[in-house]
Amino acid sequence: MKDYQKHSVLKTEQLSIGYQTKKDTIVIASNINIELNSGELSGLVGANGIGKSTLLCTLTNVQPSLNGNIYINKKPIEQYNNIDLAKALSLVLTESIASKNLSIFEIVALGRQPYTNWVGNLSETDISIINKSLNDTNLKDIKHKKCYELSDGQLQKVMIARALAQDTDLIILDEPTTHLDMYHKAYILKLLQKLAKDNNKTILFSSHEIDLAIQLCDKLVVMTENNVVSGAPSKLIERDTFDALFPKDFITFDKTTNSFKIIR
């Protein structure tokens, strides 16, 4: 593994997120100040309905921010055109693949769209990047399989490989472990950890798997009703950040095991 030097890839300053209607402005969260560096795996965690998806949509320019600034590689996100933004960040959503009749190789090759000509011809460089992405995600030996033949875990790896083939500094995933069993949840997050380190990527994912995220992430972004904070898991544990995630009527965070426990 190469010895990469870390640099800031995603940064927000006094960011406010939410929705603008004809009659009102609905603020989901405000004063969001986070900074994620190259080679880091970061998890976005919080209770259901707290606004994780809204934050990811704002960070990826799918919906506008209400206030504040977002920088990708120190450049304001609004200064990117669509093609340049697709070369800076890749997004993996939970929605199913549109055509499962495509092979794994064909799906991963779609990640090269920002770089190919208008007819989508693949160059030798494109094919090399696609094959590396397949190899990095342990899909090379089955790259000719059709997507309808794959398990949910394999499909998730295909989407991650497509994001890798897009060759961006920043990869953002919306709940990549949905519908997976415990083993495959851990497998996918461990894979993301390895990809971040080996390829010097900045990877941010949202998840309900807080215990796993605490174990595997370099940083966590924690959304509560009152604020959004980020930092190393150990530092957040020291500050009792996770105590504010859920009501304390029957679940609590145990600092001795770094996990949530049911109150008996």
Image (cartoon, grey):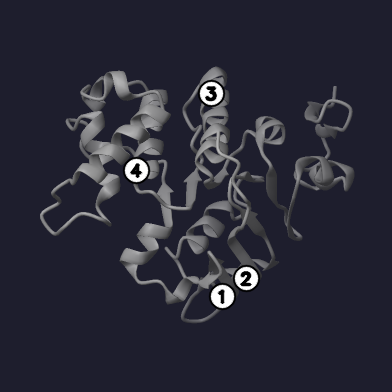
Any mark on residue 165, and which?
4
Identity of the amino acid at label 4?
A: Ala
Camera-near label (2 vs 3) is 3
At label 2, counting other C-alpha atoms closer than 10 Å, the crowd grade (few under 14, some 14-19, many 20 or more) is many
Residue that label 1 marks: 66
SS category of the residue bearing label 4: helix
| Residue at far left of view | 119
In this orientation, which residue lies closer to the viewer: 240 or 146?
146
At label 3, counting other C-alpha atoms closer than 10 Å, the crowd grade (few under 14, some 14-19, many 20 or more) is some
Any mark on residue 187, and which?
3
First-in-chain label (2 vs 3): 2
> In the displayed structure, does residue 38 sit left or right of residue 14?
left
Instruction: Say whether marks 2 and 1 touch (CB < 8 Å).
Output: yes
Question: Marks 2 and 3, how far apart in space?
Answer: 34 Å
Camera-near label (3 vs 4) is 4
Q: Is residue 243 visible?
A: no
Question: Marks 3 and 4, how far apart in space?
Answer: 20 Å
